[in-house]
Image: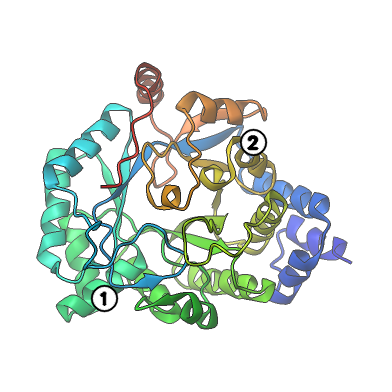
């Protein structure tokens, strides 16, 4: 039943949401994964696969939204809330640069008091100290929150942040882009159309971003496809997404801990269908952070062409009990074991100069894994 659909994908034809749902409902992971790998190799015939070196810096865990799936956030009245001192934040950026990183992923909670000038100063301080670093920062929920706190339009907020040094936008806070799901698992957070509008305006300003999906909680299979369809339609409109990343919900220590975590089978299945459906997004990242080394490596044969980031530091997923950390040598070996050359890239998917790549490898071999610091 699915062979005709998979043949369309291999030939570069667009499949419909209904056909994608048929694939997601099928149990033939081998056939679907093989087709996703074929499509990935058609889109990326080069003999290398990529990775990035960056660090997740969570500048605050204070958040006015209440998300049942989040173990990281703290309410504004919590004694466990923090805002990273600026010197500590800059030290983290410096450590990233020393290890060959060319980017930081900077996200936080929805802080109720900080105005736009606080964020502009933060960006300017980072760019002043480390002008070569790309700041991949502020997810759509944060950006939308900024518009409310400052009584400004999306265009005004994003333009000012871009001028202050914001380089690209992460796709965080998407979860499932279906309002039924969002309204059940979160309160006080951006809904579907507004999440998409943040990305739309950013793309119109010439910015790039990633798109994400956290699945495996209360959504239906049809709602996963609806999410993918919303992303694909916006990409048709703007062309601003460089990559898509999906991962399974991590329930430990959350208010949804009663939900059983999804299997590696379901992760690989959903990623493969995502590769087949998102025909206009060039790159798919493996999520080894949630899946571990072996499944993260296997994902490279199920539609992914990128191993994602070394992720020197990660706090949000770690708070939910998932603590997979890999060395740079492990990431590179995972790629090379599949018969590809391992190459470091930047956020734009440009390859890093070989001499800088070698320098980063040497620096990482000399340094043990940096500690995860959440407060």
- Disc 1 secondary structure class: helix
Q: CA distance from mark 2 to mark 1?
A: 41 Å
- 207 relative to 151, above or below: above
User: Going 47% across and 73% down the picture, which residue do you hit?
Assistant: 237
User: How far across and down, in percent of the image, does residue 210 sit?
Assistant: 44, 57
The total number of labels drawn is 2
Quadrant showing the N terminus: bottom right
The picture quadrant where one finds residue 346 is top left
Marks 2,1: beta carbons within 8 A: no
Residue 204 seen in this snapshot: no
Q: Which residue is mark 2?
A: 294
Q: Is residue 149 left or right of residue 335?
A: left
User: Going 44% across and 44% down the picture, which residue do you hit?
Assistant: 349
- Disc 2 secondary structure class: helix
Q: Is residue 112 left or right of residue 104?
A: left
Of the numbered discs in the image, which one, if any, rests on residue 154?
Answer: 1
């Amino acid at each position: 039943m699915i062979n005709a659909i998979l043949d369309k994908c291999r030939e570069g034809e667009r499949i419909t949401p209904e056909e994608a749902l048929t694939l997601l409902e099928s149990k033939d992971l081998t056939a679907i994964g093989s087709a996703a790998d074929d499509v990935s190799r058609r889109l990326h015939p080069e003999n290398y696969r990529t990775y990035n070196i960056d660090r997740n810096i969570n500048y605050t865990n204070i958040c006015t939204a209440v998300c049942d799936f989040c173990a990281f956030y703290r309410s504004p009245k919590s004694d466990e809330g923090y805002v990273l001192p600026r010197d500590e934040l800059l030290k983290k950026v410096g450590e990233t640069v020393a290890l060959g990183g060319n980017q930081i992923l900077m996200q936080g909670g929805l802080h109720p008091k900080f105005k736009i000038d606080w964020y502009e100063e933060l960006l300017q301080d980072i760019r002043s100290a480390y002008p070569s670093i790309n700041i991949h920062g502020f997810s759509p929920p944060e950006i939308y929150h900024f518009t409310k706190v400052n009584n400004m339009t999306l265009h005004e907020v994003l333009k000012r942040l871009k001028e202050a040094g914001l380089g690209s936008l992460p796709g965080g806070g998407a979860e499932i882009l279906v309002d039924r799901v969002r309204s059940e698992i979160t309160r006080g957070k951006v809904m579907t159309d507004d999440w998409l509008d943040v990305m739309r305006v950013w793309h119109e300003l010439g910015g790039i971003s990633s798109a994400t999906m956290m699945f495996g909680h209360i959504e239906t299979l049809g709602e996963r496809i609806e999410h993918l369809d919303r992303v694909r339609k916006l990409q048709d409109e703007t062309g601003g997404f460089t990559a898509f990343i999906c991962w399974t919900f991590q329930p430990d220590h959350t208010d949804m801990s009663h939900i059983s975590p999804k299997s590696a089978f379901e992760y690989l299945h959903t990623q493969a269908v995502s590769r087949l459906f998102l025909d206009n997004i060039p790159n798919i990242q493996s999520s080894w952070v949630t899946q571990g080394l072996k499944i993260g490596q296997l994902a490279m044969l199920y539609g992914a062409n990128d191993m994602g980031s070394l992720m020197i530091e990660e706090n949000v997923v770690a708070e939910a009990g998932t603590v997979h950390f890999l060395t740079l040598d492990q990431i590179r070996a995972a790629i090379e074991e599949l018969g590809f050359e391992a190459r470091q890239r930047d956020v734009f998917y440009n390859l890093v100069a070989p001499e800088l790549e070698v320098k980063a490898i040497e620096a990482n071999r000399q340094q043990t894994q940096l500690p995860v610091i959440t407060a």
